[in-house]
Amino acid sequence: MNTAIVRIELAPGYSVSRVLKGGWHLAGGHGTVDSEQAIEDMKAFVDAGITTFDCADIYTGVEELIGQFLKKYKHAFRSGDLAPVQIHTKYVPDFDRLGTLKRADTEAIIDRSLERLGVEQLDLVQFHWWDFDTPGYVEAALHLTALQQAGKIRNIGVTNFDGKHLNELVEAGVKIVSNQIQYSILDRRAEEDLEGVHQKNGISFLNYGSIAGGFLTDRYLNSPAPNPPFENRSLTKYRLIIEENGDWNFFQTILAQLRSIADKYEVGIAEVAARWGLQRPLVAGVIIGARNQRHLHKLKKLAGFSLDEADLKAIRQLISQAKGPSGPVFGFERDKTGKHGRIMKYNLNEK
């Protein structure tokens, strides 16, 4: 089986691995992190061809941790012993600051990311805005454009932008290369909300939630429905998405179908779910929240098989029976009073 991780050009002259190493699980709330081991795990991922890391200004300690990795192996990068890496971070202004945000505020956070990572230019900054009813998101995106022109940012992306508001940024002249969104077999909101805008403007999807925080794995096949409290916020979040699709019995039907397809390729349910994401139109890559290298051998298998039309048809027929979710991308999560919004943390940048 071919295990070479495929690369894709996200922007002219800028390529990324189609499997990206997510950083959220290295932040607080997901268990103790051994920094030395985490750095060695990063090297193992790069050695395996997964050279693109995803992090954020609000992921506690993660930019610093990646910065330590870059510093430790700087000579290996310079000599060519270690392949170049791409670091994608985010700009997530606090909810309480949205109405008063100035360019100086934006630049201060970008400068902080540069310092934490120990780099002179950020490869990709993905912009998030909590509340579109609060004006200022176009201006904030234009602040990023100015910082791009100043050389501090190479590429600009967004995260969790729906079609209407993404189009506003494009019309304002912001050159956007990607939109990081929750997109999976369990969450297809992007298909009706975003594909037109993305295709028209050459914007790629970067998917998170491809395996629903671990729910789309063999671990949960034939298991009883888990009850809260869950061990981390990720599981809480994706349990709600499962409920949008239907009851736990329907979710078991989904897992059983994916297991049947997985048997065909001698892989796991998670690999089938991630492979489905990679084969969706306009998807450049899937972000997998692997805390360590324990599952690295499984990620390599993603390059060794493709779902055929029979597989895709079976999945289409199954998810057509789902109740939801529907509506704009990240729509549920923006409602601070709803069950999805209540678990979000809206003010993390000042901590």
Image (cartoon, rainbow, N blue to C red):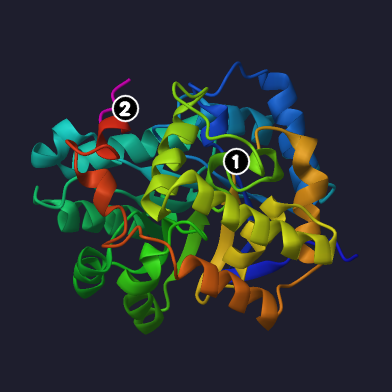
Q: Secondary structure at mark 2?
A: loop
What x and y, as percent, mark residue 115?
47, 32
Using residue 228 as the reference point, say whether residue 262 is left or right of it. Answer: right
Residue 214: mark: 1
In this rendering, the answer to whether 141 lies above or below 310 is above
Q: Secondary structure at mark 1?
A: helix
User: Does 21 appear in magenta?
Assistant: no
Please give the residue where the numbered disc 2 appears in the rendered image.
Answer: 348
Residue drawn 34% across the image and 71% down it? 194
At label 1, which amino acid type do we have? Gly
Residue closest to the eye, 135 or 260: 260
Residue drawn 8% across the image and 51% down it? 135
Main SS category, magenta section:
loop
Q: Quadrant of the C terminus?
A: top left
Residue closest to the eye, 18 or 47: 18
- Decide: few, some or many residues near mark 1? Use Cα within 10 Å; few <14, some 14-19, many ≥20: some
